[in-house]
């Protein structure tokens, strides 16, 4: 494995958007699934992290992100509304960066767990 892929979780894409533009924000908010646990933002947060991948991976990513930093996580509607494939991590830049870093590290360590540990 080359060094550029060493710290990337297989099958998962992670992106950071700093200072979301109004068009990005409008699209994201239109696609965000409404949830009672999510506190709506009156203005866009400093940053938004996007995590796309298999359902099990992004569910785990949501848990890791919220435990790692002061962020909110929301499901983003995909092309097919019945298949969750993207979550957004909202918060200030340092918190979102910390959450995405924790997700990347955690998913890299658990994508192919040692089956003896089950």
Image (cartoon, rainbow, N blue to C red):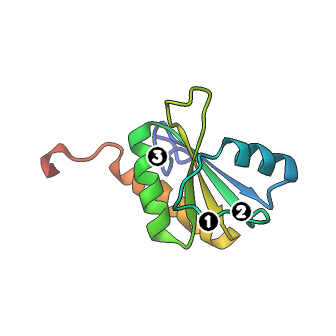
Percent x, y of residue 59: 42, 48
Q: Nearer the viewer, mark 2 or mark 1?
A: 1
Q: Earlier in the sequence, mark 3 or mark 1?
A: 1
Q: Earlier in the sequence, mark 3 or mark 2?
A: 2
Identify the disc placed on residue 39. Answer: 1
Q: Nearer the viewer, mark 3 or mark 1?
A: 1
Q: Kindly state the secondary structure of the residue where label 3 is placed.
A: helix
Given residues 78 and 36, the one toward you in this image is 36
Q: Kindly state the secondary structure of the residue where label 2 is placed.
A: strand
Q: Kindly state the secondary structure of the residue where label 1 is placed.
A: loop
Percent x, y of residue 30: 72, 43
- Which residue occupies 77% across, 66% down? 42
The answer to whether marks 2 and 1 mark residues whose Cβ atoms lie closer than 8 Å is no
Q: Earlier in the sequence, mark 2 or mark 1?
A: 1
Q: Residues within 10 Å of mark 2 (few under 14, many from 20)?
A: many
Q: Residues within 10 Å of mark 1 (few under 14, many from 20)?
A: few
Q: Quadrant of the N terminus?
A: top left
Return the residue at label 3: 58
Q: Is residue 19 left or right of residue 115?
A: right
91 is higher (above) or lower (below) than 31:
below
- Which residue occupies 85% across, 46% down? 23
Q: How many marks?
A: 3
Residue at the right extreme of this rendering: 22
Identify the disc placed on residue 47. Answer: 2
Percent x, y of residue 113: 27, 47
Residue at the top extreme of this rendering: 80
- Which residue occupies 65% across, 72% down? 94
Q: Residues within 10 Å of mark 3 (few under 14, many from 20)?
A: many
CA distance separating discs 3 and 2: 19 Å
CA distance separating discs 2 and 1: 15 Å
The answer to whether marks 3 and 2 mark residues whose Cβ atoms lie closer than 8 Å is no
Asked where in the image residue 47 lies, by quadrant, the reply is: bottom right
């Amino acid at each position: 494995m080359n060094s550029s892929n060493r710290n990337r979780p297989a099958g998962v894409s992670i992106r950071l958007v700093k200072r979301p533009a109004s068009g990005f924000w409008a699209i994201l908010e239109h696609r965000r699934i409404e949830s009672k646990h999510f506190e709506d933002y009156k203005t866009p947060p400093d940053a938004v992290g996007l995590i796309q991948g298999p359902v099990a991976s992004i569910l785990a990513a949501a848990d890791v992100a919220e435990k790692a930093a002061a962020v909110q996580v929301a499901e983003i509607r995909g092309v097919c509304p019945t298949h969750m494939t993207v979550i957004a991590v909202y918060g200030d830049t340092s918190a979102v960066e910390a959450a995405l870093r924790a997700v990347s590290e955690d998913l890299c360590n658990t994508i192919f767990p040692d089956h003896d540990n089950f």
